[in-house]
Image (cartoon, helix red, strand yellow):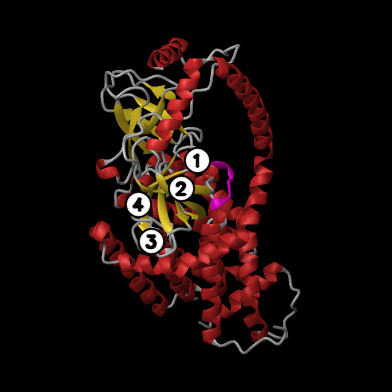
Amino acid sequence: MNDTRRTRSVLGVLIVAALVLITVDYRGGENSPLRGLRDVGAAVFGPVERASAAVVRPVGNTFDAITDAPDQRRRAEKLERENQRLREQIRAGAIDAGRARQLDRLLGTAGIGGYKIVAAQVISAGQGFEDTVTLDVGSSSGVRRDMTVMSADGLVGRVTRVGPATATVLLATDAASSVGARLEDTKEIGIVTGRGRRGLGDGGGTPMKFQLLNANATLKVGQRLVTLGSQGDSPYVPGVPIGVVERIDRPEGGLSRTAYVRPFARFTSLDVVAVVVAPPKSDPRDAVLPPRPAPPPSPSPSVSPSPHKKTVKAKRKREG
Amino acid sequence: MLNAPEPTPAGRHLTAALVLVVALVLQVSVANRLPLPGAVTPDLVLLTVVALALVNGSLTGVVVGFCAGLAADIIPPADHTIGRYALVYCIIGYVCGMASAEMDRKSVVPFLAVAVGALAGTTVYALTGALLGDPRASWTIVARMVPLQVFYDVVASPFVVWAVLRVTRRYERADRASRDRFALPAAKYRAMSGRGTGL
């Protein structure tokens, strides 16, 4: 038998060592004395991961292309339709002075409230229950802890650890992540928390949930969320789009309602993202949100109450 | 390569370390990014630990498991308490190493070891998370993740175990040059496990 006394004593020693490591690291928290060990890990494995990412990228892309093929076709069709609609919108916009002013304002605010960013690429992803990724930028590119990370579509997460050439990002879908959020067009604020590894908790389409602080505020399906912005713009800068309220749970007799949020960013295929290295000079409010798509000519019956959309549109027109 | 080198312990340790590093890097940069249904990915590091333990016995399993776990705790995207994977893989290396003696009798043992290892690994990892108050180790997440994790690990195990055997085999050939090189996998497992007692 292999189970000799020596083996057992080695097992005992190593288990004790592991338990000591866990205890020391857990009690230390952010200032854990084992932080140096992580730095060593980042310094050693970071370059290896970068090299490996460069090699395996074509492989991953092929795999993505295969699994996404039906999805891409659907997307292409959708984009074609959208293209058509946008072309019509532009034609209509030439005569619609109100809409033209809105576009102007959009461009203006994007210019004023622009984020200063560093573009980065995702090179590896976390294991087990955690939803984390590594980026190929580090302290040498000006990336620091607690910076916001966003993609072209919306919020991705925040930087939790920085190595010389790599940075670890805690995704907004991680169960340990919570983000201050604001409902569009209102001042109602709440907290968006992740539901575990890419929505594994239950339901892949809505990997985040949102809880309003004010129990009496109106909350509707289809409302969109932006980041509220943290104290000193760290870790979250204001105005980054988060997602759309997809479903609302109303527990009987409960005071708090939970809304399930479909994110704008595509967390399953993150590739090129941006780290916000300098916050905007002023809160961009809802300006970064994409313009609300015009309702299709024959609206399909949906859960979303249409009067709400009309009021929003009316309000916008009045503002415009 | 064709002339197998003398099986020195240093060479064997180096090979094991190399295999682990490759498994770790493939895990974070390839496996974890695969858009697999259920958002769970096979745990290549666990499979490597299981394979090395099955081939070399408990003592190697324990040491290899601890080192692999510690590396998995500090490799960049990791964001959990240091030592959790070290504890889990260390225990798995020990348990699967004990099964290496059983490999003489049944060829299904590797698959069983992988299944048990994956189940125990995910459960113990979740348990340590629950003890430390990790919000990620909530019941809804764990309950959905464990069956999928075991399934993916078992599906991926033949490839990983084959690759690990392939790399470590050069030392075996020197040990048993007379043995048929093209033996069936089951016979190969047996040949491998025979040496585990020597450690």
Identify the chain of the residue marked 2, using the numbered disc in the image: A
Mark 4 neighbour class, 10 Å CA radius: few under 14, some 14 to 19, many 20 or more = some
Q: Are marks 1 and 2 in contact (CB under 8 Å)?
A: yes
Q: Which residue is mark 1?
A: A152
The reply to the same-chain question for discs 1 and 3 is yes
Visible residue check, residue B47: no
The answer to whether B149 appears left or right of B126 in the picture is right
Q: Which residue is mark 4?
A: B129
Q: Are marks 4 and 1 in contact (CB under 8 Å)?
A: no
In percent of the image, x 26 and y 64: which residue is there? A24
In percent of the image, x 33 and y 42: which residue is there? A236
Identify the chain of the residue marked 1, using the numbered disc in the image: A
Real-space CA distance between mark 1 and mark 3, rounded to the nearest whole angstrom: 22 Å
Real-space CA distance between mark 4 and mark 3, rounded to the nearest whole angstrom: 30 Å
Point out the image quarter for the N terminus of chain B. bottom right
Q: Which residue is mark 2?
A: A274
Per the rendered image, the range of residues in magenta is: B33-38
Mark 2 or mark 3, which is nearer the start of the sequence? 3
Q: Amino acid at mark 3?
A: Ser
In the rendered image, which quarter is residue B83 located in?
bottom left
Q: Is residue A206 above or below residue B165?
A: above
